[in-house]
Image (cartoon, rainbow, N blue to C red):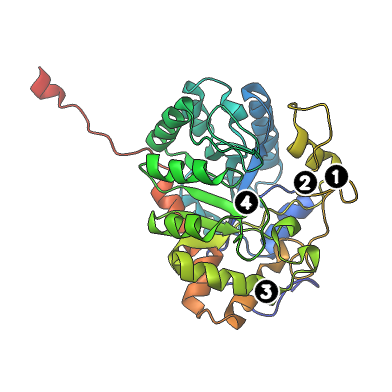
Amino acid sequence: MSETGAMHPVQNPLIDGLQYAKWSEKVFRQMREGGVDAVHVTITYHENFRETVLNIEKWNRWFETYPDLIFQGFDASDIARARASRRTAIFFGSQNPSCIEDDIGLVEVLHRLGLRFMQLTYNNQSLLATGCYEAEDTGLTRMGREVVAEMNRVGLVIDMSHSGERSTFEAMEHSTRPIAITHANLASWHPALRNKSDDLLRALGQSGGMLGFSIYPHHLKGGSACSLQSFCDMVARAADLMGVSQIGIGTDLCQDQPDSVVEWMRVGRWTKNIDYGEGSAAQAGFPPMPDFFADNRDFGRLAAGLRAAGFDSGNVAAIMGGNWQRFFGESFTPAVQAVPNTKAAQ
């Protein structure tokens, strides 16, 4: 057990619905120490298609360099392969649609390269939808509706973590497959712009969608001082709203990242000014993580906290990864399409 770990091992599978750490051998080894079977990792924010491909090339080198620790995941069966080989399956995601530029054909190209999640917007208005920081949410755009349908077809999950409320409702309504909010919490617990209303989360659960709970301090009641009990009590409240089968963990862990990275996340190329997002001029960089979760070795503490909040062992296992595993299985493969009967046509 690491000095930051907990006494209670987490039942498998253990899956994190979102991380954007500064990737290194240290982080990969901590994933293994924490027993993390799969992680949805952000590979791109404001990067265009070619820049996103360069980021995939970086990941290819990491897979080549650390084959005993990590490998690229493509479908839910890779979770079992990760467990059997004692490695972590890495599933790619984008936090903005910049990677498809204005070309719907790149949705399928990126899915073939391994992209499995894509947010329709990152805080701002995009070509597809409205972000949670815009004053007016006009919902899905015409292109947004087309891209949602294409994402449904190829098996690319629609992620609305940074989107506005109307846009998220419309994504749920227009999508023929369940969507995800991979990293956010309840606005009724902490009213951050990025957290989600009870009405929206209730609808998300009813639609079969997934919510991943964020441990990023700006999303927590009390920020970096948030207690494990408060966090797990919030999870229990969400289970009542959505159903325990529709929730998981999406830590939004940004371990070891320099503050220049959070500036890129917030500012990108869209403004000359500094945008502080959920931070401020006095707290412009990454905030300290809460004491109950510093890195991938601390998932056992979350499991223990959920048990203390009243979840039984089966529900703890579901929240810590079982629900994500089911969702991955339902979401990552192309939609079933009718195959033409060529003999009849002849």
Considering depth in this image, is 103 or 71 the residue closer to the camera? 103
Query: Is residue 205 toward the left or the right of residue 235 in the image?
Result: left
The span from disc 1 to disc 4 (Cα, nearest Å) is 18 Å
Residue, disc 2: 22
Residue depicted at 82% across the width and 50% down the height: 286
Residue, disc 4: 18
Badges 1 and 3: C-beta atoms under 8 Å apart? no
Considering depth in this image, is 267 or 76 the residue closer to the camera? 267
Query: Is residue 265 toward the left or the right of residue 39 in the image?
Result: right
Amino acid at dot 4: Leu
Label 1 vs 3, first from the N-terminus: 3
For label 2, the crowd category at 10 Å Cα-Cα, with few meaning under 14, some 14 to 19 and many 20 or more, is: some
- Assign a secondary structure to mark 3: helix
- Assign a secondary structure to mark 4: strand
Considering depth in this image, is 2 or 276 the residue closer to the camera? 276
Label 1 vs 4, first from the N-terminus: 4
Q: Nearer the viewer, mark 1 or mark 3?
A: 3
The span from disc 4 to disc 3 (Cα, nearest Å) is 21 Å
Amino acid at dot 1: Pro
Badges 3 and 2: C-beta atoms under 8 Å apart? no
Residue, disc 1: 258
The span from disc 2 to disc 1 (Cα, nearest Å) is 8 Å
For label 4, the crowd category at 10 Å Cα-Cα, with few meaning under 14, some 14 to 19 and many 20 or more, is: many
Label 4 vs 3, first from the N-terminus: 4
Label 3 vs 2, first from the N-terminus: 2
The percent position of residue 225, horizontal first and vertical second, equals 80, 68
Q: Quadrant of the N terminus?
A: bottom right
Q: Which mark is residue 230?
A: 3
The span from disc 4 to disc 2 (Cα, nearest Å) is 13 Å
Circle count: 4
Q: Which mark is residue 278?
A: none
